[in-house]
Amino acid sequence: MIITNSLGSNYTSGDRILALKLLFQPWKWKQGKELETLKSVIPAKVGIYLNRFRVKPGMTVELFLKGRHAIYEALRKLGIGQDDEVIVQAFTCVAVVQPILDLGATPIYVDVDTKNLNPSFEQIKKSATSKTKAIILQHTLGYINRENDEIVKWCRNHKIFIIQDLAHFFIPTPKPTTNNQQLIASANAIILSFSQDKVIDGVSGGALIASKILPLPEKLNDSNHLILIEIGKHLLYPICTWLIRSTYQIGIGKFRVGKVIHWLAKFFGLMNSPVDAPTTPTALPNALAALTFNQLVRLDKIIVHRRNIALTYGRILNRKFKLVIIDDIKNGSNLRYPIWVGNRDELEKKLTRHGFYLMDHWYDAPVSPERVSDSQVKYQPGSCPNTENLSEHIFNLPTHISISNEKAECLAKLINQ
Ligand SMILES: Cc1ncc(COP(=O)(O)O)c(C=O)c1O
């Protein structure tokens, strides 16, 4: 089995069997009890122990087909619209920015700190104006913003709504640190993503956890307009990706069975880029809630594994590559282990020769993916120089369940060479 960062690396055989079973139970695809089950476990799983951490009472959980739908709904319910400004960091995904644009508001990009994945408090303060209504705080690749507490306090004092985007960051321990408490307790809305290659990967999914400050949710479009074929394609993804990875080494010369299956899967629309999904809020179909729940029950195990792998990289890799420190790893969910590389192409070629197919440059632009035009997302080229530099040098190492400690050690040593 080859090592990749993506291509269904998060699924166990249990996840694949469940997907296969669901494929033959189409009556469970749209509606079913798994939706309620998932909803009911989310607060505890993400560390929102209501009384203990004084989260505003009346928190509600809504499930969506995508994390970006949850962002859209959070902004909409907070009343964000025309002429409002929303602070986001550069070094982000178009999925974060598009909901802001769709609501007619303006994203204000804040540069990340030098060789850091998140922006500094100082930069955030400078970017706020009288039009700033909200901030989306993203904790890139599962590493909490080191100044989260200060940022949160300042936003509260300045009546700026706080949306904690935890698409990459799942609370890693049952006993959250002070930072984690602030993350949850002071948010007006919390976003989760269960989409491909996230900490919890149910192929596609998202959640909005919102406090009472938001008006009561209106009835959401259900997933009825999601044609059954689309749900079927999502269910095939864990199986298809497994087939591709397990047959990639089989073949003669440049001909690889896995490559052919990959091509066929793309041809039949089974491997559409998740980045291109629309922002119109859509409810989560029951079948994907079932896949998500199946992973969520193993969250602690997943987090411990990711942390151990990241610690292994941190122990072995030369200092010049490092972007995160030990504390980041211990407090984070370590969605990837990012490093700074001078020449990515050269490194990738070398790693491929050793069976590591790693081409992960998440994020490859201030507003990723690179093919998104700056004008479309209202990004001013040159305005976030640290981010532009980082996006040319970042290279992410895998921390998912398919990479063992031995493989991680081998990978780190290869990189050091
Ligand atoms: C920081 C962040 N937030 C939110 C999202 C949106 O997640 P989804 O793909 O589930 O819409 C992404 C997508 O990668 C992301 O990187």
Image (tube, rainbow, N blue to C red):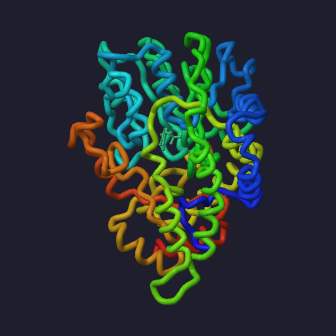
Q: Is residue 98 left or right of 210 when viewed as pictured?
A: left
Foreground residue, 334 or 9?
9
Q: Where on the picture, by quarter, is residue 207?
A: top right
Residue 332 visible in the displayed image: no
Q: Residue at x 47, y 72 (%)?
A: 415
- Percent of width and height locating residue 379: 26, 37
- Vertical position of residue 64 compared to residue 169: above or below: above
Q: Position of residue 88 (x, y in %)?
A: 39, 31
- Depth check: give the residue in front, 365 or 247: 247
Q: Residue at x 38, y 34 (%)?
A: 97
- Position of 185 relative to 250 (above/below): above
Q: Quick check: 212 above or below 246? A: above
Instruction: Where is residue 125? Give x, y as percent.
Output: 35, 24
State the residue at coordinates (47%, 30%): 280
Can residue 144 be seen here?
yes
Frontmost residue, 224 versus 146: 224
Q: Quadrant of residue 308?
A: bottom right
